[in-house]
Image (tube, rainbow, N blue to C red):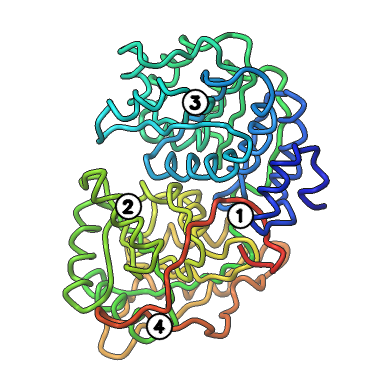
Amino acid sequence: MSFSDFPFHPDLQAAIAASGYVNPTPIQVQAIPPVLAGRDVMGLAQTGTGKTAAFVLPILQRLQSGSSRKIRALVLAPTRELAEQINAYVVSMGKALGVGSVVLYGGVGKQPQVQKIRAGVEVVVACPGRLLDLIRDKAVDLSGLEILVLDEADHMFDRGFLPDLRRILTYLPKKRQTLVFSATMPAEIRRLTEDVLHDPARVQISPTMPAPSISHVFFSVVAEHKTALLKDILQRQEVATALVFTRTKHKAKSLALHLQKAGFRAASLQGNLSQNKRQQALDGFKTGTFNVLVATDIAARGIDVAGISHVVNFDLPDTVETYTHRTGRTGRAACTGEALTFVTGEDHKMAIAIERILGSRMTRQPVPTGLVADKPAAEALKREVGRPRTAGGDRALAQPRPARRRAVPPAGAKSRGGRSASFDFGVRSSGRR
């Protein structure tokens, strides 16, 4: 199937063709038709499967006809970064149709956002807190809303937005189309969907499985040697770009500073930064100014950068689902990627749980000479070698891939050019995204 098979307006088809995309992803194939038909949709899909285009394209198709310069579609997102990504995609695809949009989030002044709303827009992409502020200020009128989208609904609950979501719903027309997209379905989100969706079409694309284009490697290492191991990997392996996850904001900041002092082009992305600093870090990562971005899980679903070669779990996440979201930042579409995970003695149970859920044994990589392996973790992971495998055995995703990428150069080295953001869209005709 190709995008030309969808009944999109010629100007929208032209915008899609100009972007170089031909083949929709599975979530797009299954979700776009019911959205075009006006049905509510409940979509479950992992990070990086193309959910953004699955709702933006049919929304733009609907908005190209009818009244303009009033708010007709609202997309709620849990992070500023994700809101910016979605809005940028709406702008890129909607300009040919004359559809205007605005992005709303806190940490910046309200007045520029209010001015854009007053100028007239059809689409609002917002974080819940700032949207509620502007509703209370009577700067936003949602009485004519036709479509509501809750993107990354489970992450909104994780970040405590559920009360804000319920308050926002009281300002919306009862008669509307509602689309909910999520990677997982905890009980709280399930109850919310039962309240807001009417006879929804249900679309599910392997929500707990990572892309098969990702190879997975475990390193058992003592906690005090994790920084040295990361530096060794960045120096010796073919790492083009690395997204490194830590458990806390303080550790993300301190690790990025340590890497900078060691000569790496690194930055941090975490909640203590101002919006301006966060945007600088993200933009620098997109353009190649930084090759290494150290982030907390706030970035797991808000970063969509083409060509991330490695995801490093400096600290192991608390859940298998979070592991999937993190590693979904690499190996997008037809590209390959590597997920490297540092396992200490206190982490081995989660590491084993990840393997059991994914159904394959990950590659065990010894730490370099001079660094100390965590023996309890190594022994626990070694014992798992003999455990019964699930159906399918050790899949191809667990096999190391030949190195094809250049190493991260130290500070001062010339980059071969920047890289642009991808938009969770589809598959280019060349096979890359």
Residue type, label 2: Thr
The residue that disc 4 covers is: 407
Provide residue 337's location: percent of width, then percent of height.
53, 70
Q: Secondary structure at mark 1?
A: loop
Q: CA distance from mark 3 to mark 1?
A: 37 Å
Structural distance between the alpha carbons of marks 2 and 3: 33 Å
- Can you tell which of label 3 and label 1 is closer to the viewer? 3
The local secondary structure at tag 3 comes to loop
Front-lying residue, 419 or 46: 419
Marks 3 and 4, how far apart at CA: 44 Å
Q: Which residue is mark 1?
A: 209
The mark closer to the camera, 3 or 4, is: 3
User: Relative to 132, is 354 above or below?
Assistant: below
Q: Residues within 10 Å of mark 1 (few under 14, many from 20)?
A: some
Q: Which residue is mark 3?
A: 121
Identity of the residue drawn at 46% across and 10% down: 171
